[in-house]
Image: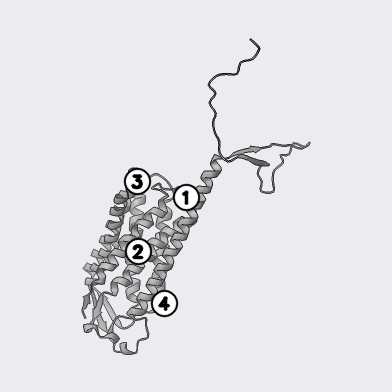
Amino acid sequence: MGGVFLPSVGASITSRSLSGNPVVDFHLMKGEIVPHRYNPGYLLLAAAVSMGAVAIWAMHYIGNRAITMLDGQRELQIQYSAGYTGGSFILPICVVSVAFYLLSLSEKVEIIRIAVVGVLTGAAVCGMHYLGQGGIANYYVSYSWPYVLGSAFIAVTAATIALGVFFYLKHNWIKNWWKRALCAALLAAAVSGMHWVATVGTTYRLRRESRKASGLGRQGTVIIVLCLALGCCITLMTFAVIGQRVRSRSANQAQQVVLASVIFDTEGKLLVNPEGTLPSRKIAKTYLEEVRAKPFLSGAS
């Protein structure tokens, strides 16, 4: 049973492309890969949420909104199981979190590690797609294996190339946002291309009990997706503000002049604060280096 693709295809591709750049930006802190020991967990979480929840999951359901079944009869449009929909939301976030964790382990870019990350990212896209499709409540869904393999190849290959090119050339791209946008567009092609190739190879067969199905309808699914995507965007903006404040505070503290005292007792034990640090006090907000033009002269002329 075929379907009709509506103009919302463009909206799904656009949403994916726009969400690709924040993924890389949150993970990289101004274009630099941050080693794991310096990388706060919220940065990885923000990257995983942006990629998995907004870019992959939301694109899938917004894209499926473009499929019109049986001349648009409202009661025969695709409905989804709430359980599968929730599971497909969690899956890509977990897999992408592992992928970004592997990227954060070292500043050195290794081909094997990039390949593994690309495979994981492609697997997240494919896994989310077919798990979401498995949650269709009012149609039996069958797939053509050549399209399944082709969609998986597109997802893995495009994701590997995009991530590999970006991380390999990151040092030259710190201020080139348009190059980052190209990588985001390539990631968009990975997700959107995989989705629509798989959709072309999908056959829908109406269930006899479909009129009694109680799954989520198209409108309800879109509302849920938009609410979750908006929530994710607000969360990411919060993470961005927190990260900026942390970096600003660290930069300010690095410029301060602090006087610390080292005190030992009669037994040779070092006196420290309850926090385990030396007693200290800030004596200046910034350090101003003074250059003396002449050395001091002693004696009288």
**In the foreground, 125 or 152:** 125
Q: Amino acid at mark 4?
A: Gly
Residue linked to disc 3:
175
Label 2, residues with CA under 10 Å away: few <14, some 14-19, many ≥20: many
Can residue 278 be spotted in the picture?
no
> Which of marks 4 and 2 precedes in the sequence?
2
Q: Which residue is mark 1?
A: 36
Can you identify the residue that label 2 sits on? 55
Label 4 sits on residue: 83
Residue 133 appears anywhere in the view = yes
| Secondary element at tag 4 | helix
Q: CA distance from mark 4 to mark 1?
A: 34 Å
Q: Between 249 and 53, which is closer to the camera in this rendering?
A: 249
Q: Which residue type carries mark 2?
A: Ala
Q: Are marks 2 and 1 in contact (CB under 8 Å)?
A: no
* Kind of residue sitting beneath label 1: His
